[in-house]
Image (tube, rainbow, N blue to C red):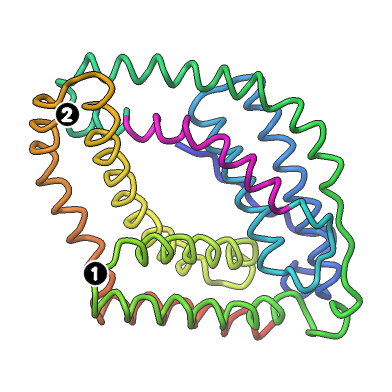
Amino acid sequence: MATKAKTATPTGQQQLARLAPAEGLQHLLAQRRQQLFDHYTLFLQQGGEEALHDFRVSLRRLRSLLRNYQKFIECDEFLVGRLRELQRQTNLARDLEIFIAQLNRYCPEQAQLISALQQQLQGAYRQLQHELPPQWAALFPLIRFSLSPSTATTASSLGHLTAHLGKRQIKQLNKGLRSLQQHWDESLLHRLRIRGKRLRYLLEPLAEEAGYLQTVEVMKDFQDTLGDYRDLQLLLQYLSESRAEKEGLTVQTRELLKSLAPQWRQQTGQVKRYAKRDRQKGLIKSLRYALHQLDKH
């Protein structure tokens, strides 16, 4: 569905991971800022699911970059919060996309409900295209950065700095997976999904040149598995709360929820497999390999 945004290689023969931290971060910040501008412009011009997805991904990538390297990047104190609010504003359209995709996949006979949701989705796109420009006009000038003086002395290269930052995140992810193995907790599962995204966005820009593309694919599989579970969870919540309450379709909703039960059990099983020791070790081992590769740069 989404287009893949790649990190351009710096000019010359020097790889991004081998650049000094300050130089490498300047390159990443400029690239993420440009991607955000391009995808925002494309969404305003075209609208639609793919354009919205790319805009949301570019928001998350910039937010993750600022969060992951927050000790070394100086920016407007309200910028991260405003980027987060901008992303939240797109959540309704994204949720409607999820509901439509899940219903088309599991319950295509629900044509009336799908049609109603599609109309709501088109309205959500139009509303975003109307409401985003004034907020963007106030936000975009704030997307300016400077680097902390400590950046020059912290590490020998961007790869080395990134490896150092990744170690703590892997420990947190591993700890969460062990907790999930002992006790099933949907709120923890959601936090693990967010941690997985942040870690993937940290490692992704340097993956090709440092030789751990397979690790990024493993992380994407982990993220997608937890994402599929989350999507179905959101649909079930919508059906059990909004639809029956607003449209008086209690009986139909109950039947629809019942028909989705097998898919719910299947998705739960897939996610629980990631909490098993063998899958858990494979994921963490792959991440540690990526950090080892980065540390060599």
Quarter assignment of residue 236: top left
Give the magenta-colored segment's residue range. Answer: 80-99
Please tell me the numbered disc located at residue 151: none
Q: Where is residue 217? Give x, y as percent.
A: 44, 61
Task: Residue at 51%, 31% (x, y): give it.
Answer: 50
Q: Amino acid at mark 2?
A: Cys
Task: Residue at 28%, 22% (x, y): give it.
Answer: 246
Q: Is residue 41 above or below residue 221?
A: above
Q: Secondary structure at mark 2?
A: loop
Q: Where is residue 156? Give x, y as percent.
A: 80, 84
Dominant SS of magenta comes to helix
Q: Where is residue 279? Give x, y as percent.
A: 28, 75
- Image marks 2 and 1: residues in contact by CB distance under 8 Å: no
Q: Which residue is mark 2?
A: 107
Q: How many numbered marks, from 0 up?
A: 2
Q: Where is residue 226? Give x, y as percent.
A: 34, 57
Q: Which residue is mark 1?
A: 184
Taking the image as shown, residue 239 lies to the left or right of residue 89, namely: left
Q: Quadrant of the C terminus?
A: bottom right
Q: Nearer the viewer, residue 38 or 234?
A: 234
Quarter assignment of residue 150: bottom right
Taking the image as shown, residue 243 lies to the left or right of residue 53, namely: left
Residue at mark 2 to residue at mark 1: CA–CA distance: 28 Å
Q: Amino acid at mark 1?
A: Trp
Q: Residues within 10 Å of mark 2 (few under 14, many from 20)?
A: some
Q: Residues within 10 Å of mark 1 (few under 14, many from 20)?
A: few
Sequence order check, earlier mark of 2 and 1: 2
Task: Residue at 88%, 72% (x, y): give it.
Answer: 148
